[in-house]
Image (cartoon, helix red, strand yellow):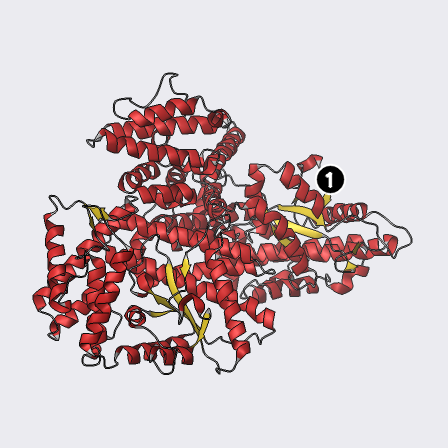
Amino acid sequence: MDDFSRQIDFLKQHSTYARRWLSAHPEWLEWLRIQGQKTVDIQGIKDLLQDCCLDSQAVEQDEAVWMSNLRLARQRLMLWVAFRDLNGFADLQEVTHALSHFAELAVSASIAFIREDLKIRFGLPWSDSTQSEMPLMVVGMGKLGGLELNLSSDIDLIFLYEHEGETSGGPKSLSNHEWFTRMGKRLIKLLAEHDANGFVFRVDMRLRPNGDSGPLVCSLDMLEEYLLVQGREWERYAWIKGRLITPLPESPDFILCQKELDQLIRPFVYRRHLDYGVIASIRDLHAQIQAEAEKRSSGHLGRSRDIKLGRGGIREIEFLAQMFQLMRGGTDPRFRVRPSLEVLELIKQCSILPAHEVESLQAAYAYLRRLEHRIQVWDDQQTHYLPEDEEARSRLAISMQDQHAQAEVFMVELERHQNNVAQLFEKAFLLDDSTRLEIAPLSRDWAPDQTRFPNSYIRWQAWIDSPKQKLLPQKSRLIFDNLMCKAAESLYSESSSPEYVDKTLLRFFDLLEAIARRSAYLSILAEYPKALSNVLDLLKASQWGAQYLTRHPHLLDHLLNAQSERALIEDPEKYWTEVRLNLNMRLDDVMAEGDGSEQAMDILRVTHHNETFITLLADLGIGVQQALPVERVSDHLSALADLILQTTFERAWPSVVKKFDLPLDVNPPFAVISYGKLGGKELGYASDLDIVFLYQAGESDYAAQEIYALLAKRMINWLTAFTSTGSLFEIDTRLRPNGSAGFLVTNAEAFRRYQLREGDNTAWVWEHQALTRARFSAGSPKVGVFFDSVRSEVLSQHRDIDQLRLEILEMRRKVHAGHPNANVEFDLKHDDGGMVDIEFIVQFLVLGYARQYPQLIGNLGNIALLRIAGDVGLITHEAAQSVGDAYRLLRARQHRLRLDGAEKTRINLVDEVELIAARGVVQALWLEIFKAPSNLS
C-alpha cells in the first residue's frame, strides 16, 4: 500500500463524512491525490470554484444547477482540508483560513449570481457618494470574521447597504431596502438550503440589529442609530470580530465600504480610554453562557463535556483575549486584530500576562481547535461535545496523536489543557470573590476614625450629604463607599502619625472624587487589590504624584503591573525604541484619514502622561526592587522629552509642506537645540523646555526663514496647546540669539557667527555659559552635527581668565538678586553653596580651560566635568569628589521636595549635618576659584 492509500484509509477511518462522499464520487480520489499535497490557499480555492463552473461565466446558469455546483465545490474543499488536517500536513491556520476564505468567495460568487437576475428585473441601486452601483456589504462575524471557521461552522452574517433610495435601469423600480432584502433572502437560500448534494453553510443572522425581530438588511444610518441608542455590551464583543467580507478586498468598492463601516464600528466597540468595566460585563456574560451550556448538557448522554462552552473551553480563551482587546483597543490599535491567537501573541509581546501563561493558552487553543475539527469531521456535524463511548474516544486519541495513542492518555492531556485555561480564566476575570473588593452597603454610621483621620472625617460627613454623591449611580456609590472604607482600614493599621495617614486618605478622597463618574476607573480599584495597594503607596510617597494621578486617572492601569517599570530600568534603549514604534503606529492610525492633528496631539499627551508616570513609579520604588536614583530619573524624562520633540517635528512638518506646496520627499535641514535642564539631561517632572530652532539655508533665502518659522510655530502649538488631555510642556525660546527680540528661528551660519562674535551682533558670556549645557535634541542630525561643531569651536576659544572670572561672578550675583531669600532656610538651588554655584563653577572651568583641555567640551553633566577638572589639575581630586557628591545630594533633596509638592526647595539646616557639610565644600571651592563670595548680601 502506497503512502496516499494509507492516508486515504486514515481519512476514512476518522470520517464517515469522507467515506460517504468518496464512495459517491470515486473520481475525486485522483484529484485528491494531487491536491492533497498542496497547501489550501486562496488561489487553490478560486481554481476549485472555477473547476466547478462557479466563475464569472456561471451567472447564466439555472439556479438549481448553480446551487448544486456550489455544494459539490464545498464537499471537495472539505475533503481537501480534512485530508491535510488529519494526516498532519496542515497547521491550524491553514485549516481555518481555508474554510474562511472559501466562505468569503462562496458569498461573493452567490451575490454576483443573484445580482444578474435582480438587475434584469429591477435595475440596480445607485450610490450618491461614488456615482456608481451600490454593493451589498456583507459583514462576517464570529469565527468567519476572525478567519477562524471550523470544519462544520455556520456563518454569522450581517447585511448592510450604504443609504436609502430607489433602483434604476430596470423595467420596474424597488426601494434600495427591498432590493437588498431580496438579495439577502436569496443569498441565504443559495448557501443554506439542502439539496441532494447537501448545503454550503448554515447561515445565522441573529447578530444583526434587533436580531430575529429586526429587518434582514439595514442601511449604515440605521446601523449607526441602533448602535448609539440600543447597542448592548455583548454586541461590543461580537463586533470585535466583525469583518467586511463582501465586497472582496480586490474590489474597487472595498476601501470606501471598509472606511464607512469602520467609522461606525470603531467608536462603538473601542473606548478612547482603558476600559476596565468590561471585566465584570464579560464575567457576567460568561456565567450566562456557561449556565446555558450546562443546562443543554444535563440529561443528554454523550453531551457531558462541551469543549467550546464548558469549563476550560475555547470560549474562555476567546473571552480572555477579547477582554484585553476591549480594554486596550481604544488606545492601542494593535489590539484591534481579530484572530484570537494573534491577540494572545500581542498580550505576550506587551508583557500584560507572563509569557508562560500566554503560551499555555496558545497551546490549549490550538489543541482544542484541532480536537473540535476531529469531532466535527466524523459526520460533518456542528457539535462540540466529546463523545462518551470508549471507541469514539480511542478514535479521537489516534487522530490527535498517533496509531498507538491511548484514550486514557488523551483524556489526561485534554484535562491538562482545560484546567490550565480554567485557572488562567479565573485569575484574569477575578472569579475568586475573596480577592475582590466586597461591594455591599456600609453601615449608616460608618465614617473614617475621627481620631486617626480628623480632616478626612469632616470631609466624609460633608460628602455623604452632598448633591454630587447623591447623583452617582447606585453601583458607583457602593464602590466609592467601600473603597474609602478599605483605604481607611489599610491606613489605620500603619504606625505613621495621624497627620500623615490623614493626608494620605484625603489624597485618596481627591482621586475617588475625580473618577467617581467613570465606572471603568472605579472598576480597576474594585477588581484589583494590588492596584488599590499601589495607589495608597503612591499617595503616601508623593503629593505631586497624587495630584498627577488625580488629573490623569487613565494612569491607574500602570498600577496593576510593574512590567513597564522593570523594562525601563533593565534595557532603556530597547524600551524607548518600543515606545517610539507604538507611538508612531497610533499616530499613523489617526492621521491616515485627513488631518487628525487634534487626535494626534491627544495621543502625544497621553503617551507623555504614561511614560512620566512609569518613571515616577520606578522613582518611588513602586513595583520594582530598588528605586531609581535622581540621575536616572532625569535621563528617562529627558529621553521622553527628546522623543516628543522629534515626533512633533515629524508630524508638524507635513502640514508645512502642504502650506508651501513643497516636494513631499524634502528632509528639512532644521534642528531643535535644547538648553538648560533638558540640555544637561537634568529634566524634572514639571520642568519647562529651553529650546532654540536652527535651520540651514542661504542667508538671503527669506522663503526658508518663513517656512521654518511656521514649522517652529506649529511645533510650539503642538507642545503647548491645551486639549482635552492637557498640554505637554511650557516652552521657552528666549535663549536664541537676541532673545525675545530675535527671530524665532535662526539661520545656522548666522548662529555660528553670533556665537563666535564675528560682526556687530555678538553673544554675551552668559550665552556661552548656557551653551555648555546645550545639545541637539530633535530634527535633522546633519544640522545637529553642525551645531556640535559650532559649540565645540565656541567653547574652545581663548579667553582672558581674569575677565571671565569677573563676568561670571557678576552674572552669578545678578541671579542671586533675582532670587532673594530673606528666610533662614537654605535654598538648595539659589543660595550660596547651592546648586547654581556648582553649575557656575563648572561653566567657568569649561569656558576658561576647554581650549587647553578638550575633554571638558563634552556635555557630560556637572559631576563628570568636575571629575575631569580634578584629573587635569584645575581643582583638587578631593574638591572634585566632595563637590560632585554635594551636587548629587542637593539634586536628590530638591527632587524629593518637588515630589512632596514644595514650590520652593528650602530646608532648615538645623540637624542637617550632611547638607551643612555639602554647602561648606561648595562655598570653599567657590572662594578658591572666584576669590569672592557669590552673594554680596
Instruction: Please name whichever residue, 429 or 543, is drawn nearer the observer in this view of the structure.
Output: 543
Q: Residue at x 68, y 41 (%)?
A: 225
Quadrant, the C terminus:
bottom left
Q: Residue at x 22, y 81 (%)?
A: 851
Residue 824 visible to the viewer: yes
Residue 623 visible to the viewer: no
Residue 319 in the image: state x and y as whole percent.
48, 42
Q: Which residue is mark 1?
A: 215
SS for callout 1: loop
Instruction: Please name whichever residue, 144 or 848, is drawn nearer the observer in this view of the structure.
Output: 848
Instruction: Please name whichever residue, 268 or 96, is drawn nearer the observer in this view of the structure.
Output: 268
Image check: 911 left or right of 779? left
Residue 160 in the image: state x and y as whole percent.
70, 48
The answer to whether 401 is drawn above or below residue 649 in the figure is above
Image check: 401 left or right of 330? left
**What amino acid is at disc 1?**
Pro
The answer to whether 298 is drawn above or below residue 764 in the figure is above
User: Which of the 4 quarters of the picture holds residue 737?
Assistant: bottom left
Residue 254 in the image: state x and y as whole percent.
67, 59
Which class describes the residues within 10 Å of circle 1: few (<14), some (14-19), or many (20+)?
Answer: few
Q: Residue at x 72, y 61 (%)?
A: 54
The answer to whether 57 is drawn above or below residue 526 in the figure is below
